[in-house]
Structures are given as C-alpha cells and as structure tokens.
Amino acid sequence: MSIKHGLLALLREEPKYGYQLRGEFEAATGATWPLNIGQVYTTLTRLERDGLVMAVSTEADGRSTYEITEAGRTELDNWFQTPVTRESRPRDELAIKLALALAVPGVDVSAVVQRQRAATMQSLQELTRLKRGDRDDEISWRLVLESMIFAAEAEIRWLDHCESILLRHRGRPAKAPQIHEADDTTEVTR
C-alpha cells in the first residue's frame, strides 16, 4: 500500500490535518506501519502538487487542513478497484538475500535460512500473542494482523522448502543461470 492512497482514503470523508492523518493511519493499520510526521507532510505536499488534495485552511499555529479533490477521489476509486499484482509489490529482500548468498562463495546459506526461520518464528509467536488480545470491534486491525500471521507462516513454509532444496543439492557445484539466444526466442537454463 502506498502512503499516498492511505492518506487519500482517510481524507475521503472529511478534511484533516497531518497529525490526524498520521494517528488515523496507524490506528487503521494497528501501528504495523508506523509513519513519521515528515512522511505525512511530504506526501501531502506531493498530493497537493498533483491536484489530489488541497489545503482548505491554515490555523494560527501554521497547521494546514487538507481535503480530497475530485481528482483525488477518482485516483482513490481507481486504486480500490485495481487488484494488487505480485509485480507491483516491493522486492522480496529475503529471496534476493538467499539468491545472493548462493552466488557469493563462503556464505553458509543453511545458516542464513536457519537464522531467518528463527526470527520469523519469533515474529509469528509475537503476532499470535497479539491476536489473543484482539478485540472483535477492531476489524481493520484484525485483518492486518492476520495478513501478517499468514505471511509469516508462508515464509516459514518457503524457508523449509529452500532448506530441502539445499539439502538435495548439497555437494553439487552451483551453476549460475545461462541465457541462450536462439532465433527470436530467449531460453534460460541452469
């Protein structure tokens, strides 16, 4: 999720100032994605520049109140209607880290996997404890929390899979992928 769309969503019902937006964003996401106030105001400045929000008043203390524009509503509606694709998500740092660990001589890839599994398991336990204290009236927090639990469980399964592949291929020399160009097609082999 982009901060941009999060702020637009929070402005949909009524004008707000930056500190309100920050507090409501963190409340809606269960503080799993903490924002610093600088991020909020930088994003509001860009949204205003792009015509998606406008400052409607400035208080004596210099604090501006922002409201969503019609272009901002259209942008937000399009965002809600567009599925999130795997390609549009941030790079998977863990997958890149393991791929590079395999490519760099002298790195104990199994140890990297084990350390990550332990850290992910600890995170999963903490998330599970949080879920036990979950209140039924906080549905947005519960959805975010359960997404994080499912992601941690999936990461542990993937790490188990990585470890089994490493065990099967232990002793075999690692081969970097080679790209062969033949006619108009490109083929990747290992």
Image (cartoon, grey):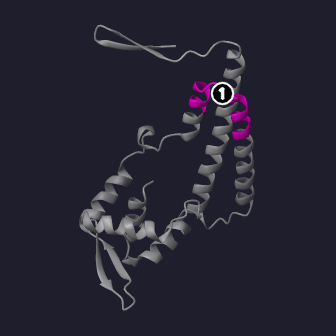
Q: Is residue 103 magenta?
A: yes
Give the residue pinned by disc 1. 162
Give residue 125's position: percent from left, percent from top.
75, 51
Q: What secondary structure is the stretch in magenta mostly built from?
A: helix
Q: Is residue 133 magenta?
A: no
Give residue 55's position: percent from left, percent from top.
29, 77
Give residue 88's position: percent from left, percent from top.
41, 42
93, above or below 169, in the image: below
Residue in the image at 59% along x and 60% along y: 32
93, above or below 129, in the image: above
Q: Secondary structure at mark 1?
A: helix
Question: Counting other residues with Cα less than 10 Å from the Cα at mark 1, is it few (<14), some (14-19), or many (20 or more)?
Answer: some
Residue in the image at 69% along x and 44% along y: 120
99, above or below 58, in the image: above
Q: Amino acid at mark 1?
A: Cys
Q: Quadrant of residue 95?
A: top right
Residue in the image at 32% along x and 74% along y: 67
Give residue 141's position: percent from left, percent from top.
59, 62
Which region of the structure is painted magenta? 98-116
182 left or right of 178 in image: left
